[in-house]
Image (cartoon, grey):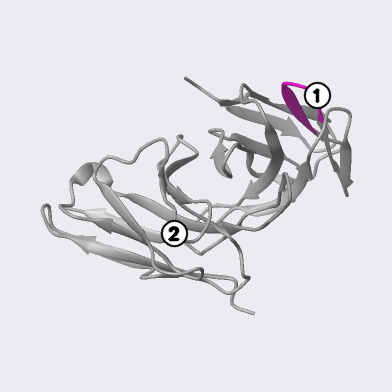
Amino acid sequence: NAGVTQTPKFQVLKTGQSMTLQCAQDMNHNSMYWYRQDPGMGLRLIYYSASEGTTDKGEVPNGYNVSRLNKREFSLRLESAAPSQTSVYFCASSGGRGSYGTEAFFGQGTRLTVV
Amino acid sequence: EDQVTQSPEALRLQEGESSSLNCSYTVSGLRGLFWYRQDPGKGPEFLFTLYSAGEEKEKERLKATLTKKESFLHITAPKPEDSATYLCAVQWGGNKLVFGAGTILRVKS
């Protein structure tokens, strides 16, 4: 049972380059999330998708775009990378039961460095 | 505005010295409050879910409680292996899930 799979695990980009981070889940969850984590900042929400076909901005969306390709896959794109986007990126997914949320499951993270 | 605030930012305890971590939130229409543990270089590991005021959950040396606007993670007689960053997250509205900045816990033997 793979859970949440992120690719790549490590990436170095030059300023101005673009790239897409891939995320897939096999738990049939409706909601998916992209976070970035910087030292001392906790996890900050970039974008989320409450269900297939919908996406919404989180706390720090500038410089990023997302695509909910289908129920399983949620990708994060950096169109023109900047050094300020150097961070660890986590993808997560969660299900839900009626009006109650359920815990999110996380991928192993992508360590991105922009030089 | 801060919607999820954790305190303290860092906590140093001696082995066996019990204490509590705090998570306060300002959202309405709570769908769930979650506690996670995160070790260096790894993704968050789920600990507890709380849904309504008065609810309590326990696991080994950890106990999580919830009131209307805050949650506490009580650590009883901690051991060095409890050292980690503890994260609180709140889910509300259209399944938005926001985390606090975390509390870094160090337990010395």
The residue sitting at the left extreme is A16
x 61%, y 21%: residue:
B26
> Where are the magenta residues, as a range?
B66-73
Q: Front-most of B48 and A63?
A: A63
The three-letter amino acid code for the residue at tag 1 is: Thr
Question: Residue A109, image x and y in percent?
Answer: 45, 61
Is residue B68 part of the magenta span, yes or no?
yes
Residue B15 point in image, percent of width and height: 80, 38
The residue shown at (63%, 71%) is A27
Check chain identity for marks 2 and 1: say if they share one: no
Please state which of the two labelled residues, at mark 2 or mark 1, is closer to the viewer: 2
Residue B98, label in figure: none
Disc on res. B67: 1
Q: How far apart are marks 2 and 1 (CA)?
A: 35 Å
The quadrant where residue B56 appears? top right
> CB of mark 2 within 8 Å of CB of mark 1?
no
Quadrant assignment for the C terminus of chain B: top right
Q: Where is residue A88 in the image (x, y as percent from the top left)?
A: 39, 53
Rendered location of residue B16, percent (x, y): 85, 36
In screen coordinates, is B49 left or right of A38?
right
Secondary structure, magenta segment, majority class: strand
Give the crowd class for mark 2: few <14, some 14-19, many >=20 residues within 10 Å: few
Asked if residue A114 is positioned above or below residue B66 in the image, the reply reads below
Mark 1, chain letter? B
Under tag 1, what secondary structure?
loop
Q: Quadrant of residue A112?
A: bottom left
In the image, B50 versus B12, the foreground residue is: B50
* Residue type for callout 2: Gly
Q: Using the image, tell me which numbered label, if any, was put on residue A53.
A: 2
Which element carries disc 2, helix, strand or loop?
A: loop
